[in-house]
Amino acid sequence: MNVPTEYRALFNLLLAGEHFLGSRVVDGLTLGLPDRLQARLASRLARQGPGCYRDVERRRDIDPKEFRDRYVARGIPVVLEGLARDWPCTREWDLDFFRERYGDHPILRRGLEGFDRPDQRWTDPAREQTLGEAIDEMRVGASTYVRFGTVVDAHPELQRMLDLEVLERLRNPRTVTAAYNFFAGRAGTITGLHCAILCNLFVMVHGRKRWTLYSPRSTAALRPRASRGQYFYSDVDPDAPDTGRFPAFPFVDGYRFVLEQGDVLYNPPYVWHHVANLTDTIGVGYRFTHAGSSLRASATLLMLRLFAWDPPPWATLAAFASGRGAIRTLVERRTAPKHSERGRE
């Protein structure tokens, strides 16, 4: 079930206050209303019973216009089953492929707030390494995870191993700033619960991932931090939720499914997602910006995103104008959203 409108409105107001003033100020001015709101929301949702997971809708041979009208315009996730099964990337890419052919490509090893669980978190300062070095670390059991990599952006021959004609047809004609974000991780690694402004066609090139999704209308129950950064994240662990901190979470519905090699997932703007690698995996997020989809998903999160400060708005606008995209700017600036513990800002 989704959070009732009045609770969503009040939570969004508090989140905006935390974004601009800090959580300690908001707690003080409202006499601890953020915590009381969570308790009241949990009580309200409990009347309708516990939440449940269902499979995401799955389609084959879908017409691009129907895809845009039914899923992109309405913000509905969907798995396009087997769409990429016969693409060259799916047939040829694995960790050895990139280790042997693109092992010298530079990447930045750094932590991103909200993405790693504690036992997999990178806490050292950011440092340069190569893609080959990262894959070698994965091979010996390290929790190294290449996220938002630029290797596909940097090598047009890799882009041509995707079916660009298909991807372009699925994009809304009014979208901008298409980018290819490369992901590679070993079995057992996870990406924590987060959401972002971009539309994402995620190509499952190699291996299998388990995805857990929640609607933007459930944001209040996930209680994200006001990170003032490029994306939003929640400390909820869907596999072992802390119901003391997140008392409303057990009553929220979601999607849970496995993305198989060759599948393509459409993940709309501000749909919360938690991802677990069931095997060693490689994926490519084909991301694009569609302002109407982001606005319909969450006007509040869109507004706070436009007033993000890491990087600042002018850096983000310059990135969009140059066609490089916000996530690439985040990577190249070598920064991640910073936060203080709730109530300690």
Image (spheres, rainbow, N blue to C red):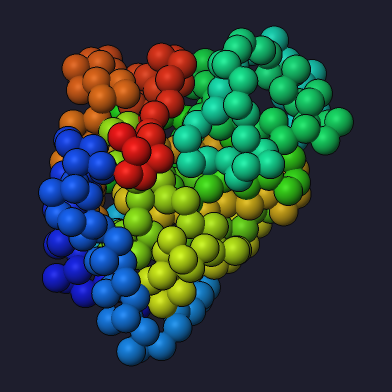
Left or right: 260 with respect to 2?
right
In this rendering, does residue 143 appear at all?
A: yes
Q: Residue at x 56, y 32 (%)?
A: 147
* Residue 342 x, y percent position in the rendering: 36, 44
Q: Quadrant of the N terminus?
A: bottom left
Query: Horizontal placement of 267 versus 74: left or right?
Result: right
Whether 272 is drawn above or below 153: the answer is below
- Residue 259: name its quadrant: bottom right
- Residue at 40% over, 23% down: 330
- Residue 189 coordinates in the image, percent (x, y): 68, 44
Q: Is residue 235 left or right of residue 11?
A: right
Quarter of image, res 78: bottom left
In this view, 207 is above or below 113: below
- Give whichever of 92, 206 is nearer the camera: 206
Out of 47 and 131, give the one closest to the viewer.
47
State the residue in front, 226 or 302.
226
Question: Which of the 4 image quadrants contains residue 289?
Answer: top left
